[in-house]
Image (cartoon, rainbow, N blue to C red):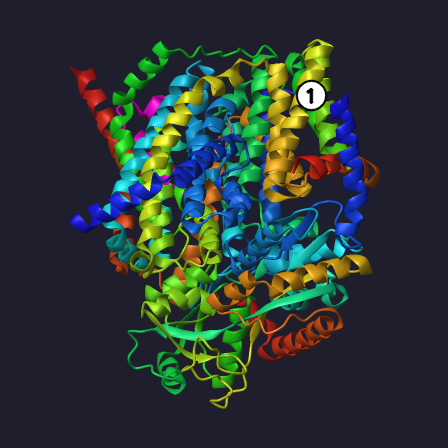
Amino acid sequence: MLDIATLLGAGLLQAFEPLNLMMIFIGCLAGLFIGAMPGLGSVNGVAILLPVTFLVPPTAAIIFLAALYYGAMYGGAVSSITLGIPGASTAVATVFDGRPMAQQGKADQALTAAAVASFIGGTISVILFTLFAPPLAVFALKFGPQEEFALMVLAFATFIGLGGDDIPKTIFSILLGLVMAAVGFDIISGQPRLIFFDFVELQRGIGFLVLAIGIYGIGEMLWTLENSKGEVKIHAVRSTWKSFRKNLSHIRDYLPTTALGSALGFFVGTLPAAGATPASLMSYGLAKTFAKDPDSFGKGNVSGVAAPEAANNAASTGSMLPMITLGIPGSPTTAILLGGMIIWGLRPGPLLFTDRPDFVWGLIGSMYVANFVTVALNLALIPLFVRVLAMPFTILTPIIFILCFVGVFATTDRMFDVWLMLILGLGGYLMRKLNYPVAPAVLAIVLGPLAERSLRQSLISSRGDVMTFFERPISLTCMLLALALMIYPIWLGIRRRRAGTTSGAE
Amino acid sequence: MKYLKTLMAGALAVVVSAPVALADWQPRKPVEFIIMAGTGGGADQIARLLQGLIEQKGLSSRPFIPINKPGGSGAEALRYMQDKAGDDHTVMMTLNSFYTTPIIQEDLGVDVTKFTPIGLMAMDTFLLWVHTDRDDITDLDSYVAAVKAAGLDWKVGGTGSGQEDSVLTAMMEAAFDYEVTYIPFPGGGTVAKNLIGKQIDSTVNNPSEQLAFYEAGDSKPLVQFTGERMAAFPDVPTARELGIDIEYYMQRSVNGPPGMSAEAVEFYTNLFQTLFDSAEWQEFCVSDGLTCDGMLNGADLAAFHASQVEAHKKLIAQVGAGAITGE
Amino acid sequence: MSTRSAELLMAVGLLLLSLGLMWTVVADDLHIGWVEGRGPGAGVWPFWLSAGMALASLWTLVRWFRGATPESRNKAPYIDGQSLGLVLISFVALTVMLLLVHVVGTYIATALFLGFYMRFIGKHSWRTTVNTCIGMVLLIYFLFEWQLTKYLPKGAKMFEDGFLWIDNFRWQYLM
């Protein structure tokens, strides 16, 4: 314990060196804006700015990129709340309640909640990281394909209640997302699947981003245009010191959800499966399932913003753990960070903690500082972000369309995906009008590939024996939890009905 | 006005002096640096390192922009390059799917021998790894015995059907007359982790993917599939020494689309030669376990590609495309 | 078209889509059954999930006939004329912009689109319109092209050369 304190002290001192502090500041700021652009997320930011870091020493470089990663996580919420477009897959769940809040003129409150929850999530996570990194790394190693699949089942179970009222339409939406996830090259068999009209471009598959931006950026936008009949209400929010303090005082409302989301996010993040996306979805699903007023979720409940944001920031810190201790990425972004470390001549792995304590603890120290810097920057910039909402719709709408196009192109480097986005957006709009829920499709396309791959890996490894999921302790636990989560809402429903009948009889 | 005049004079000076300072041909716009694999993999790392070095050393008048086209084991990238025929502002970082993908996906309509060879930056090597806890396995013979005893329960991890390590696994199955269960994972790092976590029994990983675990004493190499023993692994025998005819490398070369102009080829060849000779690149080769003896270019690299295509055709015919694509 | 007809048409369309997906899997010769000792084949996931989509569409159809969904009872027009105009103009303008990107490149196309939308739909003054267009183009150039070194589509050779000529100033004076 004392060891950790000394090492952490040294790390913090290192983070406060002028160069490193500047790196944290620039990284957070750049990340915030990159994340706030629809389409551009932490993956692109880190990938694009990686070569820039060859100019500074490795510790400063990783601090810069980690800060950027952090900033982008905060920034993703900004796009989700103000524009209603998830900038990255990690911020999908933030749209569910963030957008309704913005439409009700409570954008500043949502943004404050997102920033505060992100800060709490990030801080809890980095504390857990400091205390338990090595034992958790051992745990992560036990996590094979079976456990990954069980985790996916658990993730699906947590958002079982997220669908619309129409059951067949919700089922259709989930399945459509899962099928779309299968388009492209199957890594298990090495065969191309569902390549329509022999478009070689489809071999890459349909990216989450293309679907999400199509549906939220194009589809929802058209829907809003139609419903408002061109008289889109302006949700101008005046941001004052007083409203800021009032917003901060709401923390009590979402503190429990945030704390739960942070712990969950960190834990899921450390598992080398998918990183922050399943974490944020699970956190949202759990917050809704166990809320006193589950029906208010999706209609602008502040806990619905705080829960996923706490989890995705916690998970982004968590996903650094397998990267540093095992040399394997916990998320797509850490995959690139890992590449960077190798280029700087550092070899992540079991020995990095002992070989290069200056580097590891410098990074950990910087995470504490980066959290403070980002939350301060974010809160300071809220008045600027909410001004976006004050723009007349005849300016904001075309700008959103343009940002969707440029954002998708900048991420995938091809017009093919831009056209695909347009088509999916139109389809989403037409279906949305008929009460087909669109969110399940977006969630399914993220989790689909992970679920299918881990399922098939497990079964290949058990030579076709399905019992493999129930013979391994961690996998069994996840499966049982998933079962409990699926039963809980039904049980709750029965109990309510029974309570209803008894009270009616009296 | 005076300011404007100075600016004009400055502009003139730049325009006049520019051609003298730089080579004959220079890129006029950013160069697309296509990577035929996803972000975070070996090819991606190398491309991003090279891009950074180009920028740092100011070797090009316009930046190189790394663009990942991972679709279909590189099929997407190959078709893209084919469609870019005659373009002087696109180069591609390749790996062995450069050879295997056009063979497996016949209707792709890509002939890689028509591409413009620029430079072979490195050769990556493969070793056979098992977990250190497997005390019963000390060399290749005990390994083969263990695999044969386990039969299909023996699980080999790899990066996907049709990838380099699956070709190598198929070659080993043919050479030792055993059959194993091959489980694909996304990326060599994940494979390495699953070996250490004992989800799989053995892998053929690149040195860079296992080095950290090897140094920590978690995994051990049994045999290397190289011509000679690598300096990093002096005690590990090569397959040839043990009388098994398997030698397999992963090439990391830079190529242009078909029909690139001669001036551009000269520019890129010089540029990558400079990078190859740089201390940074040579250091990276050592730390990453790559073999970088000398950069092949021009006709030599074309001949190398031609021979590799033939070798892979033979290999795929020998082990059967089915063995590589799985089902 | 009434919402009721649209609901039927959509359900039938989605049913056909699902069947089409199933057919694609079979036509590609993917394994849709259980492979002994390996678990599900490559076609299982897309095939059976598409089958599930088909069933869900059938379910919706049954509910349509029984009038169980609010949409199947709704005789109001699917898209009413008043708002159709705005949605249609927005969508067509967006499509035209993307087509123009292939011809005249990102910058001219986005400026034209933004200008059209602001001037003719929003009825903003020319001054505001032109300023916003220039601001937007500069923002995209600065953020994507410059800071994030992305090469956005430039359209036909002529327009690309024009862009490169302007872009040259950045490389010569500002880097």
At which x and y percent is residue A388?
53, 18
A283 lies above or below B187: above
Q: Is residue C75 visible?
A: no
Q: Amino acid at mark 1?
A: Cys
Q: Nearer the viewer, residue B74 or A358?
A: A358
User: Can residue C169 be seen at all in this image of the molecule?
Assistant: yes
Instruction: Count the numbered circles shown.
Output: 1
Pick the front one: B183 or A506? B183
Q: Specify the farthest residue to the right.
A: C158
**What secondary structure characterizes most of the magenta part?**
helix
Question: Residue A419 location, x and y as percent?
Answer: 67, 37
Judge whether residue C95 is colored magenta. Answer: no
Magenta residues?
A277-303
- Give the x, y percent position of residue A35: 49, 34
User: Considering the numbered disc 1 on the image, is that residue within a helix, a strand or a loop?
Assistant: helix
Q: Quadrant of the C terminus of chain A?
A: top left
The residue lying at 80 percent from left, 35 percent from top is C162
x and y percent of residue A349 in the render?
36, 60
Residue at horizontal 73%, vertical 24%?
B3
Of all chains, the one bearing label 1 is C
Q: Which residue is mark 1?
A: C133
